[in-house]
Image (cartoon, grey):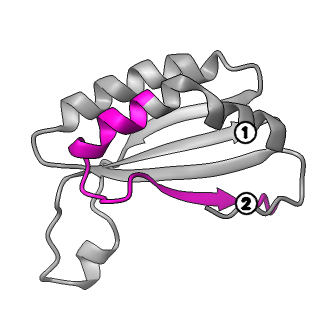
Amino acid sequence: MSLTQTSTSVELVAEFTARPGKEAEVESLLRDLTIAVRAEPGCLVFDAYVLTDPPAVAEVDPDWTAVGTRFVVVEAYRDAAAFAEHLAQPHGAVFNAALGPLIAEANGSELRFLRRVA
């Protein structure tokens, strides 16, 4: 994980792919996590989504097949300290432990930190 910030807030996108047949379990976990994270004092945004369209690779690679349903979580925290506090919360560890067997990624969620352009 790499975190380079030029502003005070920490913004990121977490992505992962639910294994076929595990989508409902992942959605349930995300609903519970969303409630807990939004209650954190330093959380500005925590919104979970499921992709409704296939990724662009499906349009350019005729041999590509989906391995499951893709989920995207958009997160923003007041500052690096608030993000560190978020990472220390037990509900995150519980979520990640439960999520692991339900997703295709061997190392958990793919995190992408963002830098606001405008």
Q: Which residue is mark 1?
A: 83
For the C terminus, the quadrant is bottom right
Q: Is residue 95 magenta?
A: yes
Residue type highlighted by circle 2:
Leu
For the N terminus, the quadrant is bottom right
Task: Give x and y (percent) for residue 112.
Answer: 58, 60
Task: Give x and y (percent) for residue 53.
Answer: 30, 55
Q: Which residue is mark 2?
A: 3
Give left or right: position of 28 versus 93. Answer: left
Give left or right: position of 77 versus 52. Answer: right
Instruction: From the viewer's side, name the closer residue of 8 and 47.
Output: 8
Q: Residue furthest right?
A: 7
Q: CA distance from mark 1 to mark 2?
A: 10 Å
Does residue 22 sit above or below 116 in this rendering? above
Task: Give x and y (percent) for residue 110.
Answer: 46, 58
Residue at (16% x, 38% y) in the render: 22
Residue at (17% x, 63% y) in the render: 66
Q: Is residue 81 magenta?
A: no
Confirm whether residue 112 shows in the render: yes
Residue type highlighted by circle 1:
Phe
Q: Are marks 1 and 2 in contact (CB under 8 Å)?
A: yes
Does residue 98 sit above or below 2 in this rendering? above
Badge 1: residue crowd in 10 Å (few <14, some 14–19, many ≥20): some
Residue at (24% x, 56% y) in the render: 104
Name the N-terminal-most of marks 1 and 2: 2
Residue 96 - label:
none
Confirm whether residue 79 shows in the render: no
Task: Give x and y (percent) for residue 21.
Answer: 10, 40
Q: Secondary structure at mark 2?
A: loop
Query: Which residues, given as a range, are shown in magenta?
Result: 94-118
Residue at (38% x, 58% y) in the render: 107
